[in-house]
Amino acid sequence: MTVVPKIAAVAFGSHAALSFASIGAGTFFTRSRAKWPSSSQALSTPTAHQSNICKIVAGIYSGLGINPTLCTNDITFEDPVALCCGPAEVVEAFRALRAAHPEHVVQPRLHVHTDDPYSAVILMHQRYFGWLVVHSTLHVRFEPTGHISGLEERWNAVPLLHTLRPIRRLNGMLSSVLTPLLVR
């Protein structure tokens, strides 16, 4: 075996191990589900941008991907598995999501817990691969222009462990290189 296939095998093995460990930690071994936000915390009148972001997110999480023209140049996407930085990595992450056959168990709904008109929290109840059901809160940041600058998905509404951020970043970089080769 030459050096390049060995490096590829190590990269793929590392990516698979990090992904499976993160998925397990994020879905099966989390603390009891964090308290779901109550409707009394929601703003009574979301901004037009917040409502539009919810519609965009519903499309992204149904397997349509994300249009790169909706992203800022410094967009990030972070979940318990990966931290993707920049439009290319984020667009690839959501392109690859199609392979998981995402579907809404319940249509994503806007839940705004802050008076910041350029952020939103979206409550999601998704199914992947036909059997893996995930409740999550998606914290979205966007610019006054409506361009998305950040997406942070918290499975079971549990905040992400910042101590694992370097591992998620490594997995995000590996994903952006490997998923184009593995997911058509």
Image: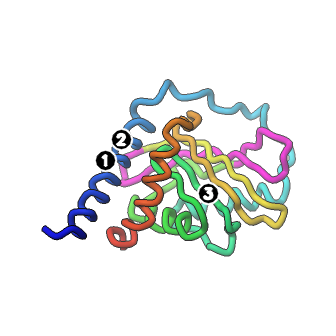
Specify whether residue 64 is in view: no
Q: CA distance from mark 3 to mark 1?
A: 22 Å
Q: Circle 1: is it few (<14), some (14-19), or many (20+) Cα within 10 Å? A: few
Give amino acid for label 3. Answer: Thr
Q: Which residue is mark 2?
A: 21
Q: Quadrant of residue 113?
A: top right
Coordinates of residue 16 in the picture (x, y in percent): 31, 52
Q: Earlier in the sequence, mark 3 or mark 1?
A: 1
Residue at 81 percent of width and 53 percent of height = 118
Q: Is residue 37 left or right of residue 143?
A: left
Residue at 56 percent of width and 50 percent of height = 78
Residue at 36 percent of width and 54 percent of height = 129
- What count of labels does the image hold? 3
Q: Is residue 2 left or right of residue 109?
A: left
Which quadrant is the C terminus positioned in?
A: bottom left
> Is 67 within the magenta?
no
Are the residues at dot 1 and dot 2 in contact (C-beta closer than 8 Å)? yes
Q: Which residue is mark 1?
A: 17
Coordinates of residue 31 in the picture (x, y in percent): 49, 25
Asked if 35 appears above or below 46 in the picture, the reply is above
Give amino acid for label 1. Answer: Ala
Compare residues 118 and 110 and report the one nearer the observer: 118
Q: Is residue 141 left or right of residue 89?
A: right
Range of magenta residues: 110-132
Compare residues 144 and 123 and report the one nearer the observer: 144
Give amino acid for label 2. Answer: Ala
> Is 131 within the magenta?
yes
Which quadrant is the N terminus positioned in?
A: bottom left
Q: CA distance from mark 1 to mark 2?
A: 6 Å
